[in-house]
Amino acid sequence: MSPFPAYAAALRNLRLPLAYVDLARFDQNAADLVQRVRAGTGRMLPIRPATKSIRCVTLMERLLARDGYAGLMCYSAAEAAWLSRALSRPTHLLVAYPTLEPADIRACLEACEGGADITLMVDDPAHVRLLGRLAEDYGQTLSVALDLDMSLRLPGLHFGVRRSPLHSPRAALELASLIAEHDALRLDGVMGYEAQVAGLQDAVPNQRAMNAAIRVLKRASNVDLQKRRADTVAALHQAGHTLRFVNGGGTGSLEATARDRSVSEVTAGSGLYSPTLFDNFSHFQHAPAAGFVLPVVRRPAPGFVTCHGGGYVASGSAGPEKLPVPMYPEGLRLLPTEGAGEVQTPLQLDAGVSLSPGDPVFFRHAKAGELCEHFNNLVLLERGQVVDEVPTYRGQGRSFL
Ligand SMILES: Cc1ncc(COP(=O)(O)O)c(C=O)c1O
């Protein structure tokens, strides 16, 4: 049953535009993600929420209060330093992407001196040298982790993302040795994120051949990457490195990642809000839990209305799948000539649909956490009622990238 009529009633007197999260759906998704990890092997690996896909401290703490969730995966060192103070309980903060920003690294060192547990990511000697020097200047030991490249390399085809150069156990061992040369650094763990499995939809409507090809590549990729990840972890252990964690996975790969015995924890974020870019996976379906509401402000011609705001387009390779989608009332379409606009979003109405100035239109966005960069608050809904309004990172005056 569509939740939108109840949402519309609950939100009637609130200022638009607004962004909302349906808490019952958010909690259901949180439980389903745990179930999917369990389904992988029967063993329970903790899920480390990806903050980039949530960007709201209240909701991150809601997750951390649940069984099955531990630690956070941050997207910037400055964010981790800030979060170490903003969170109400001590939490391990893994920064999943390297930084060369001395001020941000110093902020982490300072936070760690105050008791924070932060691990920074490296995949290049330049990262290691800078972190080693700053930590030494600070007179402190800094935890670092290796980002392993999990892409599938075939002749003429690179299936995966272009991030880390650490593709082989040998490359990882070399960088681990360099880390070991720095007294002020400690190798804390490794991360091997299989983006091409975790983030790539494989059941997109009207793309049968492409879906089939992607599934074949995902299967091949899982065989390749799970062996390399396990071999790398074994090689590091053999060389005397003690790893506190081996992180892998994302929303789209939980079952497969959990099957890899070398992995000690999985990451997930997008599956909690479950935006449109996670609608079309062959092996799971989470509930759309977040979205936004625009007011109709104009009627440019019969069969059209125009809303205020709406240009919340997702990052990544540009394409129509990155646009928001009007959901309610049903029978609304974006115009190919204008899409979702910075200030104005026109909609074409199907026959029989009528909207008046002041009416709300519900949209879903494409990429989980990015919606929060456009709104100071998230309106929280539960059982058809507004139960709270909580700040996003932006609402707390924080913008990290
Ligand atoms: C390093 C890393 N791990 C895990 C994920 C998965 O996050 P999500 O479940 O939000 O897609 C991502 C997403 O881009 C990532 O960059």
Image: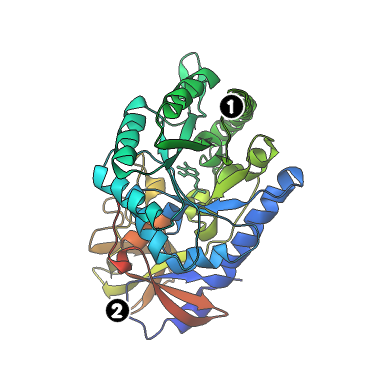
Q: Which residue is drawn at 24% across and 64% down?
A: 344
* Residue 330 appears in view: no
Which residue is farthest bottom? 13
Seen from the viewer's position, the closer of residues 372 and 307 is 372
Secondary structure of the residue carrying tag 1 is loop
- Of the numbered discs 2 and 1, the one sitting upstream in the chain is 1
Q: Nearer the viewer, residue 289 or 68?
A: 68
Q: Position of residue 234 (x, y in %)?
A: 63, 26
- 383 left or right, relative to 107: right
Q: Residue 59: image x %, image y %?
A: 48, 66
The residue singled out by tag 1 in the image is 240
Confirm or reject: label 1 Cβ below 8 Å from ligand 1. no
Mark 1, residues whose alpha carbon is within 10 Å: few (<14), some, or many (≥20)? few
Q: The disc labelled 1 sits on which kind of residue?
A: Gly
Residue 144: tell me if it is visible. Answer: yes
Query: At which x and y percent is residue 93?
Result: 46, 52
Quarter holding residue 361: bottom left
**Local crowd size for mark 2, using a 10 Å CA cut-off: few (<14), some (14–19), many (≥20):** few
Residue 163: which quarter of the image?
top left
Q: Observer-nearest residue: 219 or 2?
A: 219
- Mark 2 vs mark 1, CA separation in Å: 68 Å
Query: What amino acid is at disc 2?
Result: Pro
Q: In the rendered image, which residue does mark 2 sit on?
A: 357
Judging depth in this view, the residue of 255 and 71 nearest the camera is 71
| Direction from residue 119 to residue 316 in the image, left or right | left
At x 44%, y 65%, the residue is: 87
